[in-house]
Amino acid sequence: MRYHVLATDYDGTLATDGHVDEPTLKAMNQFLASGRHLVLVTGRELPELLSIFPKIDLFEWVVAENGGLLYRPSTKEERLLTEPPSEKLVALLKSRGVAPMSVGKSIIATWQPHESVVLESIRDLGLELQIIFNKGAVMILPAGVNKALGLAAALKEMGISEHNVIGIGDAENDQSFLRMCEFSVAVSNALPSVKDAVDLVTVADHGAGVEELISNVMRDDLASYADQVKDHGLALGKSGEREIRLPPYGPNVLICGPSGSGKSTVVRRIIEALMEQAYQFCLIDPEGDYEAVSGVNVLGGPKGLPRDEEVLHLLEDASANAIVCLTGMPISDRPPYFLGLIPQLMSLRNRIGHPHWLILDEAHHLMPAEWKPPAGLLPEQTHNMLFITVEPNLLAQSLLERIDTVIVVGQGANQTIESFAIAANLAPPKLKPIHLEPGELLVWRRDAPSRPTKLKGYPSKLESHRHHRKYAEGELPLEKSFYFQGADGSLNLRAQNLMIFLQLADGVDDATWEFHLHRGDYEQWFRECIKDEVLAASAKRVAELPGVSPRESRQMIRDAVELDYTLPATRPLPVPGAG
């Protein structure tokens, strides 16, 4: 279920002349019976609203006074979201003949044509207030207070993201909260300016328009109108002049390619797009490759195991993103841990709509080809899952059958697509030979198998943080560390980061250094464990240069490392047995 909340205006939308018709109330009850929620967002003052609308308890929260007051019908709790009206302003407006005028707990309301007097009075008193219009009504509120503010406060209480909300309204003061909703609707009697700004205009007016909307939600969760949603797509890059985006809702995506081919760059770009648009994600990180993404909560890591309740509690907050790092547990324990966590994440998503995306790095370690999921582990229909692996055939077939979009990086794109199709029980598409340059991606979709799209991927701003402290001076796991052993295996010196690598490199004997250099061990470690294709290419070039002394090759490798990594000052370590 994509949409969990309907946020609706009252006058002119839900109600006609202050009254809500019985068929509209019936539709609202059907909406609630589906497990969804209703929030009322109105400019009316609460006492007046309660007197004219006895069915207020249909709403989980009421945003009253145009965003200034929050009310919970089930407990009758009221919360003022701003300061009360200025007594000096109220007195001045009365003295200047502004009538009728009502004063709420946060709002002063009157009617046109008093807006000029109101504006002059605010200016004369030097107050920081704003005037909001609503089809002839003139509302005075503190600066920044509007229906969007009130709705955001209600959603925070509910633990629901704005991306799981439909908004419907009719007038000028509705536009702020309609803009924040994932899907915005205007009833047919709405002002032209409101109709122009929304995703959908109903055929019917007032409450009948709300009924029409609810009917569409109940039918297919507005999937029929997915193409009309404002452009929330996740930008990947450009094919010629055309920008290529992933839909923010619906796809199951596989990113695959050889080690060091740029998979993590694509993932970081998608993460960046999700963060820019406030979609929540949970990334399962078996190898600690994403620990340094700024603005994201990292749970677990080398020194601690992530607890299920810790992960779930964090994700209850729609504004929080989580990276669940599994480097602190043995490799053999990671799949069972993940299989215990995934149904809880799915249950959380089913209840409140997020995390919007689940991202599984090194997915073949968590759900390998031979894995058969227990019944009920994954829902029959999954969406917004992103799997990252080297080869498609390393993944469980039950997962591959759910994939509808494949993003390929690196060489062998044709073979990768063919491998995916065979593993997913699809007929391999007949494609012309495809060559991908560094930074290029191939996007293949199941619904258009013969028409893949090659594009130049956008660089990620997060990629500038890729060469982070974990690689420079952190603690890589044992299996990702570099080991100086020499040709005869007489050494076993572990470098768990680049700083230690350079220290050991300065200390080992020349024969050991050159053995690993010319065998391509440095190149392979930089590519597969440090995940730096540029550094790997530099190591390869150094190894192939003729007539270079061990001292010179050491310095070249050090220069290549220090070009992109900030390292503390180092000095050679004493190496037992090194001559």
Image (spheres, rainbow, N blue to C red):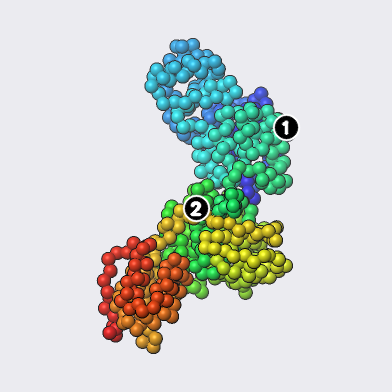
Q: Is residue 235 left or right of residue 401?
A: left
Q: Name the foreground residue: 469 vs 206.
A: 469
Give me the residue at 38% from left, 21% from top.
Answer: 126
Residue 77 appears at what percent x and percent y?
A: 51, 36
Q: Name the foreground residue: 102 vs 453.
A: 453
Dot 2 or dot 1: first in sequence order is 1
Q: Is residue 145 visible?
A: yes
Q: Secondary structure at mark 2?
A: helix
The residue tagged 2 is 272
State whether residue 487 is above or below residue 310: below
Residue 84 appears at what percent x and percent y?
A: 44, 27
Q: Secondary structure at mark 1?
A: loop
Give me the residue at 36% from left, 87% from top.
Answer: 490
The residue tagged 1 is 204
Q: Name the foreground residue: 25 vs 455.
A: 455
Residue 388 shows which numbered tag? Answer: none
